Amino acid sequence: MDIKTDTLIIGAGQAGLLTSQALSKRGIDHLLLEKETVAHKWKTARWDSLLLQQPNWISHLPDFPYVPALTDPDGFPTATQMYDFLVSFADKIEAPVRCGIAVEGLRHDGPEATFIADTSQGAFHANSVVIATGSLQVPRRPNFLSGRTDILQISASEYRNPGQLSGGAILVVGGGNSGCQIAEDLRRAGREVVLSLDRHRRVPRRYRGKDLFWWFRESGVLNTPAEEMPVDTSPLVFAGGGNTIDMRRFAQDGIYVTGSLAGLEGDTLVFNDDLGAILDHGDRHYHGLLDRFDLLAQKRGPHLPDDAGARYSWPDSPCITEPIRRIDLGDAQINSVIWATGYRTDYSWVELPVFTPEGKPHHHHGVTDIPGLYFIGLPWQVNLSSGFIFGVRNDADMLASVIAARAADSGAFRASGRKS
C-alpha cells in the first residue's frame, strides 16, 4: 500500500534523527526510513576500543545534553555508548522511524510532481526528501590482493578486535584516523603491525591544557565555510581520547611504518618512496596549527599555560631513516590485511540528475537544484563542523527551515511528527 507524507528522511543515523527533531519542532509531517535499525553503524561498523573523536561537552544534542553513561564532559564516549545515546535520543524525540525498510529507488515524474521512494515494503510518496545516508557508505578496497584467499582481508568497518585476526603479522593500509587507531589497538595487544601511510594532516589532541575542539572552536576553524575549504583535503589525524597521534612515536612503540602501498609483485608488497614526504607534510600541518593556537593564547592571557612538550620530536627509528620498499608476505608472516582506505558513496538508487560527474551530490549547503530534494550529513556541507555530530545539528536546523518554508508555500500537510 502506498504511503504519503510531506517529508521523507532516508536514513536514521544522527543526521536523520536531528533532521527529524528539527522538522517536528516546525510541525512538519514526516517519516524516517531505515533499512537496518536506528544508529545501526555505531553498533555494527566500529571496533571495540573506539572512542569518539569529539569530547562529550561538544557532542551533546539539542535538549539532550551529554551521553547519559558518561558524566564527565571532558570524556570521550565509546561506540556502544554513542549507539545507546542515539537510540535514547530517537525515543525522546519520538522520531517516526520505520526500520527494516530498504529504499531501492527514488524518482519523480517532473518538477511539480511528488517524490516516489520505491522500497522493500511498497512506495512512499513525499513532497520533500532528505537523503541522510551519510558519506561513509561503501569501503574502498584496492585490488592489489584480490584473489589472495590465503590472506584474511577486511575493511576498517569490519574490524572489531585483535582476536578476530589469524596469527602472524598484520598489514594496515591507510594513515587516517581509522588506520592509525587500529594499528595502535593491535600493537597494544602485542601483535606485529606494518602500517602503510598516506598523505595526512596531523593535529594535536590537547594543547596548553585545552582539547583540540576547544582550539578549533575558539580560533574559528570549525566555522570555515565550505566555499573556503582548504585545497589540501588529506585527512585530519587525531584520536578520540588518549595521546596525539605521532607516526614517529608509533615506530618507537614497535609499529613498522612504511610509505604508501604501490602494489604486489608475486608475493612481495611494493611501497612507494614517499614516507619522508608523508611524515614531513603531517608535521608541517601540526606545527602550523600550534603556531596559530599560540597567537590565540597570547590574546587570551596567562590562563593558557605553555606546553613545550607538544613540540617534542620523537627520534626517527630505522624504519623511517631507511624505509623498506619491499616486504615479502611469507618472510614477514603477514596473514591479515586491514584496508583503512576510506569510503565511497553509493547513490545508484537515486534516479534523479543531481550528481557531479564524480558521483557526488551537487548541492549548496545540502539544498539541491531539484526543488524539495536535500542532503544532510555530508562532509563540508556548510562548514568544517558539518563533519561532526555537533555541526550536523546546525545543518539540520537550517534544512528544516527551508523545508518548512517550502511546505508553507505549497500548503503541504503539517502534523506533530509523533512516532508512527
Image: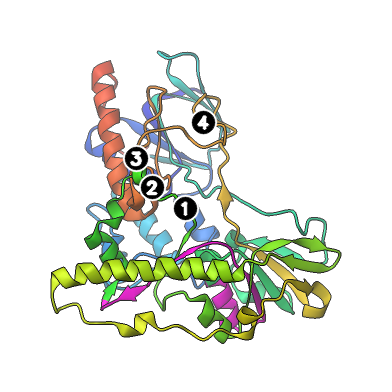
Q: Residue furthest right?
A: 266
Residue plotted at (32% across, 71% down): 290
Based on the displayed image, in which of its 4 quarters is residue 45 positioned? bottom right
Q: Nearer the viewer, residue 230 or 168?
A: 230
| Residue at numbered disc 1 | 233
Amino acid type indicated by mark 1: Thr
The relative height of residue 141 versus residue 320 in the rendered view (above or below) is: above
| Marks 2,1: beta carbons within 8 A | yes
N-terminal of the pair, mark 3 or mark 1, is 1
Looking at the image, residue 324 sits to the left or right of residue 161; the answer is right
Q: Nearer the viewer, residue 34 or 114?
A: 114
Amino acid type indicated by mark 3: Lys
The percent coordinates of residue 137 (x first, y second) are 55, 47
Q: Secondary structure at mark 2?
A: loop
Marks 1/4: CA distance? 20 Å
Marks 3/1: CA distance? 40 Å
Looking at the image, residue 393 sits to the left or right of residue 4; the answer is left
| Residue at numbered disc 4 | 355
Residue plotted at (67% across, 67% down): 273
How crowded pointer 2 is (Cα within 10 Å; few <14, some 14-19, many 20+) is rated as few
Q: Nearer the viewer, residue 383 or 67?
A: 383
- Specify whether residue 208 is painted magenta: yes
Marks 3/2: CA distance? 38 Å
Marks 3/4: CA distance? 32 Å
The percent coordinates of residue 286 (x first, y second) are 40, 69
| Residue at numbered disc 3 | 419
| Residue at numbered disc 2 | 229
Q: Please report the bounds of the magenta region as a residue range.
A: 181-209
Q: Secondary structure at mark 4?
A: loop
The percent coordinates of residue 415 (x first, y second) are 26, 29
